[in-house]
Structure formats: structure tokens, C-alpha cells
Image: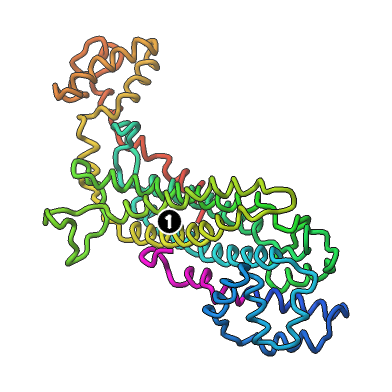
Amino acid sequence: MIPRYTRPDMAAIWSPQTKYRIWFEIEAHAADRMAALGVIPEEAAKKVWERGKNAEFNIDRIDEIEREVKHDVIAFLTHLAEIVGPEARFVHQGMTSSDVLDTCLSVQLARATDLLLAAMDRVLAVFKTRAFEHKMTLCVGRSHGIHAEPTTFGLKLASFYAEFARGKARLEAARREIAVCAISGAVGTFANVDPSVEAYVAEKMGLEVEPVSTQVIPRDRHAAFFAALAVIASSIERVATEIRHLQRTEVLEAEEYFSKGQKGSSAMPHKRNPVLSENITGLARLVRMCVVPALENVALWHERDISHSSVERGIAPDATVHLDFALHRLANIIENLVVYPDRMKENLDKLAGLVHSQRVMLALTQAGVSREEAYRLVQRNAMPAWRGEGAFLDNLQLDEDVTKRIPAGELELLFDLGVHTKHVDTIFKRVFGEA
């Protein structure tokens, strides 16, 4: 995790102290249930909680032990024994390392997802506010980067809102899928630990029971989780790409807020660059790069190996940390985005009415002209306007092949921008509901 791109709440989830605290809770809850079953003395389970509940685990000491034993869970259990005392011999009865590691990872991913869902809610709220603000702000729609037909800036933002709403639904599903507990012992047969221990720990840790673990939780769950994060990251990049294009000097329909005292370039004092959008574009790439390793983690040898372990130690904190930061940065960008409606109108008019070409073509077909001939007539008058040779409407009104089908006065009606906004309310209701 890079501090520059890490928010404190998310960093805390992946801190060593948090990890060891979760490990302790898993072991202590398991001990409680084992005591209830008569597997270990009740007094031993009580001592584990009494002496470990408020303990500050010594990270350096655990690392020191691990350097000798070469096993992280054993190092932790050894340190826990130093805290708890003789009763620690009853901890981890019938359990295996993966019971602790996998269940802990599930808890951490679930907690991280809760922060991501809160960030998604913030992004959605900002998109909704700005969408209604610019619901009828006309601008040119572009395909292939070229002027197409009029739209509104509010519709652009509504599109982003709908996409992130889908992303939130996927993230909620991913959380449900990843939030599972496995306390099933070596190779997952419960040979030395009762299934009720797993159910008890799951309940206490806010998880569901993994129906069948092979000593590890199946990694298709994790692959789906990281894929859901990656789709959200791609949605972030789509918004960032739009802003970067809109801020280009030749376009300048919207731009990131440029604060007082901000500097855009060490060499050129005039620069105002879309650095925040570029930043989250890069962060989106970092999130997406976690997907392929997560997919490759699915195919483990037999009941388990640890080829997935080193991967997840990296991608789990990195993907959640980077996505969390990018979502909050995106919310800030949209909340403070400077929009230039006059420039949007100027750009909309730049091609002298060519954005209405489809309306003219359709009117000609309604007047009895074949589609092929209508297309030819419209294009014949459009291309000179494209080259700056007269306005499109003027060219059409001078073309007798056109005016004999559509009178000059009626041609003007085909250039009404209101046609392109008449169903905006319908779209907004689909996206945001009646309210």
C-alpha cells in the first residue's frame, strides 16, 4: 500500500494489528464452542478471552518467531501462548492454518467492501445531484470523437449514475459471496473439529458457512470478488476519460476545479491539467491488474497449496485500497467539476447545423424519397458545410432537389433542438425513479 493513495480507514483493515486481532477472535470463538462441546475445559476458553481480549500483539515478537519457525500462524500461536499462558495449549484444537487465514481474509474483504459500498453511495449521490443540475444543459454528443447529435450533459451524468448503480449491485453480490467462514480442519473433512464450531465462529464473525471447503475456501469466490472491483475500476476510468476529453483546450466544456495557489506545470505557468482524472485512470489499471492473478488462484493442487497466498497478500489490500481512494477522488472531481454551458453551445453550433442531418434525411424519406437518395441529398449539402462552405440549412434551402420535397420554411423546423430533449424526463425516470 502506498500512503499517497491510501485512506486511513481502509489502511486500518489491512494493518498487522487488525489481522492478528481477527486471528485471535477466530481462535477464541472456536475455543468457546469447543468448551461448550466438552472438547476443552471451559476455564481454558475463559482464560483465552480474559488474557487476549485487550492484548496489544507484539508485531516485532511475532516476526522474530516467524523468522525461526518459518510459519506465520505458528508464530502467532506461539506469541499468543506467551500472553495467555498454559491454557493456550487448548487453542487451535483440530484446526489448520487455512481455517484462520481464510476466515480472516473473508472478514477483511467484507469490511473493506463495506467501505467501498459507502464510497459508491457517495459517488452515486454526487452524480445524481449534478445530473439534475444539468438535466437540460445542451451539448453535442460524439461518436468516434466526432460530433454526432445533440444530447444533454445531464444525460451523460445519468448514464454514469446508472453504471455505478449496477457496479454497486455487483459489489453487494461479491460481498455476499466472499463473506464465508471455513473451520473444517485438514483437507476440510471436520475429522478433528466439529462442524458446529465452524457455524459458531461464522455467526460471531458475521459470516456464512462455506458449504464445502477443501482445507481452503474455494478461490472462485475471490476471483468473482476481484472481477467486481475491476468492473467498477473500468467505470471510473470511463468517467475520467470523458472529463479528460472535455477539458482539452480545443473542447473545454468542463474541467477539474483548479484551486487558488494550485500549479499545473513546473515549466509552463499557464497550465491547468486534468491531473486528478489522470490519477484515477492509473489507479483503475492497478485494480484491474489483480483480476488475472485472482483467476489463476482458482486452480490449486488437490485440496490445497499456497500458490494463492503470496498473490492475495498483495492484491487484497492493494485492490481495495486503490479502489477506495479512486472512488472518493472521483466523488470530489464530480462534486467540484466546473461546467461551461456556453462553451457546450458554442461547440454544438460549430458545424453549422450538421448535427441535424438525420432529421433532414428522415423527413425526406417521409416525403417519398428513397433512403438511399435522401442520404445522398443530405450528404451533398453536408459536406460543403463540413468544409466551411456555407451553413447546412442555407445549403439545403438552395438545393431544389430538397426544397421540391420539403419547403424551405419546413426545413427550419427540422433544426429544432427541442426534439433532442423531449424524452429526457423519460430517461431520468428510468434511472432515478419517479422521485
Q: Is residue 433 visible?
A: no
Of all residues, the one furthest to the front in this rendering is: 68
Relative vertical location of residue 39 with respect to residue 408 in this rendering, above or below: below
Image spot of residue 42 (x, y percent): 82, 86
Of all residues, the one furthest to the right in this rendering is: 38
Residue at 61% across / 77% down in the picture?
21
Determine if the magenta segment contains residue 27. Answer: no
Image position of 6 (left or right of 406): right
The answer to which of 313 and 164 lies nearer the viewer is 313
Residue at 53% across / 78% down in the picture?
59
Residue with the mark numbered 1? 128
Determine if the magenta segment contains residue 16. Answer: yes
Relative vertical location of residue 109 with respect to residue 283 in this rendering, above or below: below
Image spot of residue 326 (x, y percent): 41, 58
Image position of 313 (left or right of 327): right
What segment carries the magenta color? Answer: 1-21
Q: Is residue 385 visible?
A: yes
Q: Quadrant of residue 196?
A: bottom right
Residue at 37% across / 54% down in the picture?
280
The N terminus, quarter of image: bottom left
Dominant secondary-structure state across the stretch colored magenta: helix
The answer to which of 186 and 407 lies nearer the viewer is 186
| Callout 1 amino acid | Lys
The answer to which of 175 and 242 lies nearer the viewer is 175
Q: Secondary structure at mark 1?
A: helix
Image spot of residue 100 (x, y percent): 68, 68
Image position of 221 (left or right of 405): right
